[in-house]
C-alpha cells in the first residue's frame, strides 16, 4: 500500500518569523498520487463523517483522472467554502477518521486534496456568470461566519434574494478575526466570499442586529425569513486575583487586534498591541495554539502554553499542536494559574500557578484535574493571553427574549433548526456547534428547512428550479 503523501510545510525556524502560510499545499503530481490511493468504496464511510456530505470519492476520482474542473464542481455541490475547509477542518475526527485505509495504514488525505482542488480552481477558473433565476423573496442572514455564509450560499443558489447583516466591518466571522493568516490567509477567504457575492448575495456591515435593527425591523422591511449565525464570541475568564492588570488579554481581543485590525503592522496601521518578551497563553484548544504561535511571530523570546491537563487531553487539532511545538512553543502541562502579579504601574509581571494531577473522569469524560496543595510556583510573564473557551454571543438573545436559550446560553432550535420565533432559524456556534464544518452543516440544514418553510407559508411558493 503506497504511503500517504505528506503536506509540504515551511521550516519551523523560518515560518515562526512571519505570517505567511505554514503549509504550502500539494503539487499537481502529489495530489494525483494521493488521489490514486483512494479505494473508491461503494459505500463510502468518509461521507458519513462529513457534516456537509461532500461526495468525497467523487471529487477524489476526478483528481486521479486529472479532471480538476470536474473535481471542483463535485466539491462545490455541497461545500461553499472548500479552500477554508481544506485548511482548517479537523479531518482526523471527521471524514478521515472513517476512511477504510486508516485501518491498515494511513487514511486518504481528504483535507489536503480538498485544499488542492480549491486552490487549483482559484488560479485556473475565471468568475462564472450568475445564471440563477431570482424568485424575489428576501431572506436576512445575521452573521457572516461559516454558518451564515453557508446558509446564504445555499439559499442564493435556490434563487432567494439574500442580505447578510454583519456587526463587524468585514465578513467571515472567526475565519477572519480569529484564525491567523499563517493558517488561513485573508485572500483565500476573500476569494471564497467573492464567489458567494457573485451569486448576488449582499453584505451590510457595521450592523448589529438587535441594536442597529431589530428582527422585527427585518420582517417589516420585507424579509420573509431570518437565519441567525451569530457565533460564540463571548470569552471566558478565570475570575482570579489580578486578572484585570495591563497586558492580560482575552484571546478574542488579542487575535482580533492582530488579524482583523492588522495590529502586527503597527505603526503603519493604528491598532497597537503590546509585543511581550515573555508571553504566557492559558488553554489547550485551537484558540490557545493560534494565540501562542501569533505571539511568537510578533517577536516574543519565550512563549509558554499553560494547560491544566496533559497534551493528550488538549482539544486543539493534532496538526496545530505539532506545529506549535516545532515553532518553539513550550507546553507546561498539569498547571493552573491562581493569581497574577503586577509591577507598581499595574502591568503584569508574573503568574502564580499550582501543579495539578488527573483524577476521576468529569462530565466531559476527560479526567478531572485536581490541585496538588502546596505546589505553588511563579512563571514570569509580561503578556498573558486567556484562551479558555467561548460562550454563545449573548447580544441578540438578551435583546429578543422570545428567542429563548438553554442554561448555557445556546439558542434553542427544533429539529428543523427553527428558533422559538416563527420563521427565524439558527445554526453554528450560537446553537451548539463548535467547528467550522459543524457550523456549515447546520447552516446547510437550516437553509433546506427555510426553503421548505417558505414554500408552505408564503403566498407565491418559491420555484424549485431556480438554477437556469
Ligand atoms: C481562534 C480560533 C481558532 C479556531 N480554529 C478552528 C479550526 O482550526 N478548525 C475548526 O473547525 N474550528 C475552529 N474554530 C472554531 C470555529 O471557528 C467556529 O466553530 C466557527 O467559526 C463558528 O461559525 P459561526 O458561523 O457559527 O460563527 P462565527 O464564525 O463566530 O461568526 C459569527 C459572526 O456573527 C457576527 N455577529 C454576532 N452577533 C451579531 C449580531 N447581533 N448582528 C450581526 N452580526 C453578528 C459576528 O461578528 C461574526 O462575524 C476556531 C475558533 C477560534 C476562536
Image (cartoon, rainbow, N blue to C red):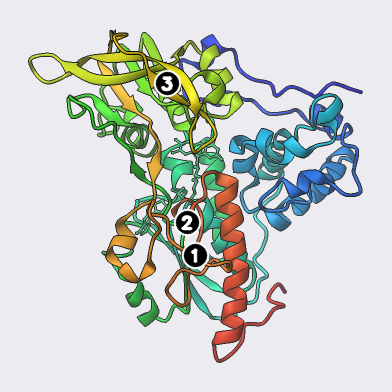
Q: CA distance from mark 1 to mark 3?
A: 34 Å
Q: Can you identify the residue that label 2 sits on?
A: 431
Q: Is residue 168 left or right of residue 16?
A: left
Q: Can you identify the residue that label 3 sits on?
A: 307
The spot of residue 26 in percent (x, y) is 73, 28
**Element under disc 2:** helix
Q: CA distance from mark 2 to mark 1?
A: 7 Å
> Mark 1 near mark 3, Cβ–Cβ under 8 Å?
no
Taking the image as drawn, is residue 207 in sight? no
Q: Which residue corresponds to the image point at 42% horizontal and 19% vertical from the top-left?
A: 297
**Element under disc 3:** loop
Give whichever of discs 2 and 1 has the lower sequence position.
1
Q: Is residue 72 above or below residue 237?
A: below
- Confirm if mark 2 falls within 8 A of ligand 1: yes
Local crowd size for mark 1, using a 10 Å CA cut-off: few (<14), some (14–19), many (≥20):
many
Q: Can you identify the residue that label 1 sits on?
A: 413
Q: CA distance from mark 3 to mark 2?
A: 27 Å
Q: Which residue corresponds to the image point at 39% horizontal and 60% vertical from the top-left?
A: 405
Q: Which mark is residue 245?
A: none
The spot of residue 218 in percent (x, y) is 37, 75
* Camera-side residue of 194 and 229: 229
Give whichever of discs 3 and 2 has the lower sequence position.
3
Residue furthest to the left:
344
- Confirm if mark 1 falls within 8 A of ligand 1: no
Amino acid at each position: 500500500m503506497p504511503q500517504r503523501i505528506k503536506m509540504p510545510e515551511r521550516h519551523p525556524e523560518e515560518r515562526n518569523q512571519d505570517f505567511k502560510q505554514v503549509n504550502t499545499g500539494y503539487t499537481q503530481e502529489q495530489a494525483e498520487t494521493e488521489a490514486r490511493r483512494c479505494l473508491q468504496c461503494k459505500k463510502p464511510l468518509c461521507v458519513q463523517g462529513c457534516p456537509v456530505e461532500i461526495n468525497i470519492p467523487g471529487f477524489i476520482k476526478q483528481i486521479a483522472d486529472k479532471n480538476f474542473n470536474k473535481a471542483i464542481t463535485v466539491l462545490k455541490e455541497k461545500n461553499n467554502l472548500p479552500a477554508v475547509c481544506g485548511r482548517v477542518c479537523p479531518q482526523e475526527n471527521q471524514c478521515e477518521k472513517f476512511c477504510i485505509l486508516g485501518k491498515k495504514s494511513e487514511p486518504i488525505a481528504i483535507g489536503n486534496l480538498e485544499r488542492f482542488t480549491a486552490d487549483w480552481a482559484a488560479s485556473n477558473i475565471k468568475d462564472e456568470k450568475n445564471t440563477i433565476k431570482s424568485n424575489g423573496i428576501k431572506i436576512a442572514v445575521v452573521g457572516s461566519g461559516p454558518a451564515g455564509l453557508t446558509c446564504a450560499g445555499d439559499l442564493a443558489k435556490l434563487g432567494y434574494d439574500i442580505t447578510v447583516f454583519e456587526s463587524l466591518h468585514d465578513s467571515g466571522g472567526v475565519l477572519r478575526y480569529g484564525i491567523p493568516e499563517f493558517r488561513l490567509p485573508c485572500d483565500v477567504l476573500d476569494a471564497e466570499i467573492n464567489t458567494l457575492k457573485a451569486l448576488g448575495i449582499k453584505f451590510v456591515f457595521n450592523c448589529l442586529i438587535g441594536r442597529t435593527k431589530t428582527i422585527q425591523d427585518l420582517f417589516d422591511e420585507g424579509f420573509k425569513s431570518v437565519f441567525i449565525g451569530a457565533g460564540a464570541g463571548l470569552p471566558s475568564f478565570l475570575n482570579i486575583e489580578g486578572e484585570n492588570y495591563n497586558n492580560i488579554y482575552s484571546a478574542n481581543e488579542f487575535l482580533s487586534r492582530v488579524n482583523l485590525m492588522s495590529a502586527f503592522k503597527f505603526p503603519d496601521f493604528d491598532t497597537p498591541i503590546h509585543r511581550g518578551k515573555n508571553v504566557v497563553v492559558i488553554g489547550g484548544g485551537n484558540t490557545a495554539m493560534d494565540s501562542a504561535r501569533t505571539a511568537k511571530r510578533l517577536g516574543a523570546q519565550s512563549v509558554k502554553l499553560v494547560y491544566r491537563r496533559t497534551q493528550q487531553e488538549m482539544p486543539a487539532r493534532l496538526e496545530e499542536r505539532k506545529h506549535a511545538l516545532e515553532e518553539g512553543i513550550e507546553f507546561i502541562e498539569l498547571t493552573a494559574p491562581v493569581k497574577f502579579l503586577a509591577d507598581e504601574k499595574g502591568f503584569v509581571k508574573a503568574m502564580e500557578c499550582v501543579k495539578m494531577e488527573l483524577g476521576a473522569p468529569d462530565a466531559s469524560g476527560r479526567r478531572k484535574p485536581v490541585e496538588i496543595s502546596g505546589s505553588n510556583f511563579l512563571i514570569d510573564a509580561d503578556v498573558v493571553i486567556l484562551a479558555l473557551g467561548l460562550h454563545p454571543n449573548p447580544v441578540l438573545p438578551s435583546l429578543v427574549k422570545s428567542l429563548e436559550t438553554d442554561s448555557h446560553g445556546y439558542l434553542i432550535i427544533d429539529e428543523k433548526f427553527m428558533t422559538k420565533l416563527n420563521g427565524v432559524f439558527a445554526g453554528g456556534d450560537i446553537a451548539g456547534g463548535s467547528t467550522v464544518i459543524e457550523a456549515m452543516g447546520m447552516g446547510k440544514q437550516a437553509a433546506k428547512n427555510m426553503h421548505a418553510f417558505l414554500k408552505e407559508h408564503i403566498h407565491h411558493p418559491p420555484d424549485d428550479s431556480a438554477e437556469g
